[in-house]
């Protein structure tokens, strides 16, 4: 019966097969491709489950493993367009795990990494930005550990897209640069099959509007355009530049090319509105359309309109738009910070901690009362026994008191640390709100970047707290596998070098030039190295930071060392700096948790992290030593 039904469905799709076989970019069995296109049309609609089952049956029947993998891709996509609930979150995670297993089994690595993209879109659409970023960083770390160029490329591309969607171009920039650099340096055919045009266009948006850097990246985007959509995207950006240059003839030519193409809505849904606003600047009707400008989703596009207005002589109007931009930025920062603080509150279990402390105090009080009654009734027989219990209870009560005091210190510390970047955000926002003519456009762009940079500082503070909380709760895991000494060091430098202060250099100097692979947790090794390098960046305002590695400094261990030319650390503070919330310089941003986290992770790996008190050079030298053969637990 099942076989007959399958044959009937195949015959019904015969007309589709002829056309589909001629256009089959996935290179799967034609019958499977016809079913696949039908499934794609039904994602999120009635009939999806039965159609996707037919795709699976066809894939199994024809032995097409790629089509079988696509069945699981579609199942995950169908779940990911639903609204987030605890039950659907569970189903999405299970579907992703199944897709990852099938993709690994059949060797379709691109779909393994595609599963991360689908799920990150699901979390992002449901307002879970923090989980989105963590998922993409997990994908990036997996790709780094496996040396998978496609995974690294796609992770950087999607992290950049996520930050751009939040109008955070400062955070997006290093990911765009890494993705472009990887595209040009790799020989991976999956990466080379992609087009870097969109990356170049997005990178252009990270620079001040109308500058040479913008034009250079748009020109590179044009050079690398492969598909029609690439060319259309380039025309869109060229039209913007022509408008900023006041070349109305060229702008209108490019505008018409874009608007006549139905695919412009796929690339930029609000393109017709955007071009009509630029036209309104040129014909003088823009003053009646302020509300439409303010409601533009992209702050970048709103900024372009403000610049055009200023260029065309509408200075007061442009100033009003600039003030609206500041409000938009403040609201975005406030929303992001609130999201991060909510995530922190859940992770730290603040409410649970308070309830637990109260419960312990009530238990102590009840037990103390019972013991007092017992002492009165049987003082002679149970005197010593009762006294011991009272003493233990006092110790327990003291622990509760100390825990409460620690929580209070933590809140005070975080209040101080959070206030610093928030004050900077408010201060620069006030500068941006100064009357027209006080600041030039480059200064306004610089102040906007300061606002975004300080927002990133808040995120870094929260990341430290979340890591510390994970270790306290026992949710921090060490997973052993093969790791290559030099690869882990270079990956750490790539992640930390964007934090360098102006004029400071960062290099890697292996003492043993030959590659060396050993058993460890590569992700945790990189995390410790990134923390040590970031710490050095904070304290080094001139000179250099050097990450070195050695196999001979301590036999049986891989020794990494981070040496900087900062102010140095007194030998008597060598151990205190590894305590939580310890900061020798209160004027340097941070929670005082970074070094403590490094030592906690190292201890779980049987490794050591310490300050080299014998170092005689300028600055400090931190040492991280990992056993080549970890102790089996």
Image: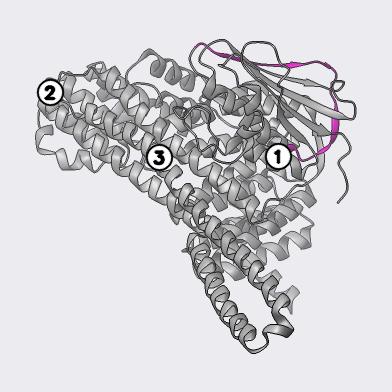
- Residue 453 image offset from top left, x and y in percent: 41, 30
- Residue 306 image offset from top left, x and y in percent: 21, 28
Q: Which mark is residue 524?
A: 1
- Is residue 505 located in the magenta-colored stretch of the structure? yes
- Say whether marks 1 and 3 touch (CB < 8 Å): no
- Residue 521 image offset from top left, x and y in percent: 76, 40
Of residue 13 and residue 160, the one placed in the foreground of this image is 160
Going 69% across and 45% down the picture, which residue do you hit? 27
Q: Which mark is residue 416?
A: 3
Q: Secondary structure at mark 3?
A: helix
- Say whether marks 3 and 2 touch (CB < 8 Å): no
Q: Which mark is residue 315?
A: 2
| Crowdedness near tag 2: few (<14), some (14–19) or many (≥20) residues, C-alpha within 10 Å | some
Going 70% across and 42% down the picture, which residue do you hit? 601
Going 59% across and 86% down the picture, which residue do you hit? 373
Of residue 240 and residue 555, the one placed in the foreground of this image is 555
Find residue 298 and report its image quarter.
Answer: top left
| Crowdedness near tag 1: few (<14), some (14–19) or many (≥20) residues, C-alpha within 10 Å | some
Magenta highlight range = 503-522
Q: Secondary structure at mark 1?
A: helix
């Amino acid at each position: 019966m099942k076989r007959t039904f399958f044959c009937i469905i195949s015959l019904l799709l015969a007309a589709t097969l002829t056309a589909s076989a001629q256009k089959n970019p996935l290179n799967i069995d034609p019958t499977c491709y016809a079913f696949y296109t039908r499934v794609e049309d039904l994602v999120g609609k009635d009939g999806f489950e039965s159609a996707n089952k037919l795709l699976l049956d066809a894939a199994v029947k024809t032995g097409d493993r790629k089509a079988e993998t696509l069945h699981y891709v579609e199942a995950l996509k169908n779940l990911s367009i639903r609204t987030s609930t605890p039950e659907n979150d569970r189903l999405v995670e299970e579907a992703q795990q199944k897709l990852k297993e099938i993709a690994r089994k059949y060797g379709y690595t691109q779909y393994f990494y595609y599963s991360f993209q689908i799920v990150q879109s699901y979390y992002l659409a449901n307002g879970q930005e923090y989980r989105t970023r963590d998922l993409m960083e997990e994908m990036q770390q997996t790709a780094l550990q496996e040396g998978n160029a496609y995974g690294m490329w796609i992770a950087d591309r999607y992290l950049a897209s996520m930050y751009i969607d939040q109008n955070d171009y400062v955070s997006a920039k290093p990911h765009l640069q890494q993705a472009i650099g990887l595209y040009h340096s790799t020989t991976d055919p999956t990466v080379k099959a992609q087009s870097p045009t969109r990356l170049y266009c997005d990178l252009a948006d990270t620079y001040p509007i109308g500058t040479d850097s913008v034009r250079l990246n748009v020109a590179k985007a044009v050079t690398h355009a492969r598909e029609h959509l690439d060319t259309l995207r380039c025309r869109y950006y060229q039209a913007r530049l022509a408008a900023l240059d006041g070349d109305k003839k060229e702008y209108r030519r490019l505008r018409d090319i874009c608007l006549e193409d139905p695919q412009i809505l796929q690339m930029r849904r609000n393109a017709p509105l955007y071009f009509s606003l630029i036209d309104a600047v040129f014909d003088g009707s823009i003053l009646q359309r302020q509300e439409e400008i303010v409601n533009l989703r992209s702050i970048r596009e709103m900024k372009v309109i403000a610049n055009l207005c200023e260029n065309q002589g509408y200075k007061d109007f442009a100033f009003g738009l600039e003030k609206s931009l500041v409000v938009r930025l403040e609201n975005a920062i406030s929303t992001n910070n609130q999201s991060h603080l909510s995530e922190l509150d859940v992770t730290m279990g603040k409410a649970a901690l308070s309830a637990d402390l109260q419960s312990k105090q009530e238990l102590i009080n009840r037990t103390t009362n019972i013991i007092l009654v017992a002492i009165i009734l049987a003082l002679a027989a149970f005197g010593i026994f009762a006294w011991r219990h009272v003493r233990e209870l006092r110790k327990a009560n003291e622990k509760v008191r100390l825990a409460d005091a620690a929580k209070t210190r933590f809140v005070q510390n975080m209040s101080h640390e959070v206030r610093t970047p928030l004050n900077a955000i408010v201060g620069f926002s006030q500068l941006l709100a100064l009357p027209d003519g006080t600041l030039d456009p480059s200064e306004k762009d610089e102040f906007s970047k300061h606002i975004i940079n300080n927002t990133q500082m808040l995120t870094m503070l929260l990341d430290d707290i979340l890591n510390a909380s994970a270790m306290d709760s026992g949710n921090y895991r060490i997973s052993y596998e093969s790791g290559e000494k030099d690869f882990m060091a270079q990956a750490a430098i790539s992640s930390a070098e964007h934090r360098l202060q102006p004029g400071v250099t960062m290099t890697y100097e292996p003492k043993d030039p030959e590659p060396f692979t050993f058993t460890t947790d590569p992700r945790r090794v990189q995390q410790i190295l990134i923390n040590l390098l970031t710490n050095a960046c904070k304290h080094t305002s001139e000179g250099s930071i050097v990450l070195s590695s050695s196999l001979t400094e301590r036999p049986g261990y891989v020794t990494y060392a981070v040496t900087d030319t900062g102010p140095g650390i007194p030998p008597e503070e060598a151990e205190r700096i590894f305590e939580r919330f310890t900061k020798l310089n209160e004027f340097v941003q941070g929670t005082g948790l970074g070094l403590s986290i490094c030592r906690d992770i190292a201890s779980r790996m049987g490794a050591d992290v310490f300050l080299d008190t014998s170092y005689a050079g300028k600055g400090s030298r931190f040492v991280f030593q990992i056993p080549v053969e970890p102790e089996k637990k």
